[in-house]
Amino acid sequence: MLPRRYKVVIAYDGTAYSGYQYQDNGIAVQQRLEEVLAVLNRAPVRIFGSSRTDAGVHAKGFVAHFDLTTPIPPANLVRAMNTRLPPDIRIMKAAYARADFDARKDAKGKEYRYFVYNADILPPHLAPYWTFCHRPLDLKAMQDAAARFVGRHDFVSFAANPHRDLETTVRRIFSFTVKKRGPRVVFTVNGDGFLYKQVRSMVGFLLSVGKGNEKPEAVTELLEAATPRTARVQTAPGKGLFLWKVRYR
């Protein structure tokens, strides 16, 4: 029987994992998924993700694809996988996909959201998912700085070295908003793709702007310089970041 391709939407709490993709230093989300799929398929299964999230990063709408030689109706697959997966990983949706569908190559855009709790005290139940900042933040300055990221730029100054060859460090940001409600500050960025630690680097720099350590104009300065990232650009912690949505045609 020919393999059948599936597309799944996955949500996970990344606290206990070394990232989505296999790593030498811990358990990956991909590993847990493939262990379950191998049982259901009665043979090894390779799952291909739409992105590579870092250690501690979470996902609400991560997309992946895989082939099964033992076909299972999508609704049954969701139930079967969720029964066997740990509670911090869940299959939200499943569907049959075209035989040539590729979760990464076919993606047209991704949305990330980063959550910061700006107050004197961080409630314990938010600690795994919100980055804590007790210093006052200038919302308008951060919004001004975020808008400067929008467009097509070389983002080498806002990315870490992935230790692999890249064709280009140019990416397009469609939108970047910063909204505050009470102590909760939410950074939402949409783009055609992102470099290694790019979102966390951009948010880290916006926090520096919010604290008054940098001016909004510094974003333009660093983008135009297009030189490798320095200590001036701090990486925000992984726990505040969620891969929110992956867009396809």
Image (cartoon, rainbow, N blue to C red):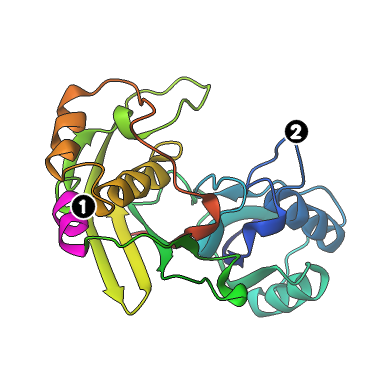
Give the residue drawn at x 56%, y 49%: 49
Estimate the x, y position of residue 163 in percent, counting from the top left.
53, 22
Q: Is residue 42 visible?
A: yes
Distance from label 2 to label 1 (Cα)?
A: 35 Å
Q: Position of residue 1 (x, y in %)?
A: 75, 55
Rendered view: 170 above or below 138: above
Name the residue nearer the viewer: 248 or 88. Answer: 88
Say few, some or many: other residues with alpha carbon within 10 Å of mark 1 (under 14 / 14 to 19 / 20 or more).
Answer: many
Q: Could you classify mark 2 by the number of other residues whose Cα lies within 10 Å: few (under 14), some (14-19), or many (20 or more)?
A: few
| Residue 121 spot, x, y in % from top left | 50, 72
Residue 69 seen by the camera: no
Q: Please tell me the numbered disc located at residue 146.
A: 1
Quarter location, residue 15: bottom right
Q: Which residues are magenta?
A: 139-146
Judging from the image, what secondary structure is the residue with disc 2 in? loop
Answer with the quarter of the image where residue 188 lies: bottom left
Say which amino acid is labelled 1: Ala
Please tell me whether residue 143 belongs to the stretch shown in magenta: yes
Front residue of 185/108: it is: 185
The local secondary structure at tag 1 comes to helix
Above/below status of 175 relative to 160: below
The residue lying at 70 percent from left, 40 percent from top is 22
Which of discs 2 and 1 lies nearer the camera? The answer is: 1
Is residue 247 placed above or below 150 in the rendered structure? Answer: below
Q: Is residue 49 magenta?
A: no
Q: Which mark is residue 77?
A: none
Residue 24 tag number: 2
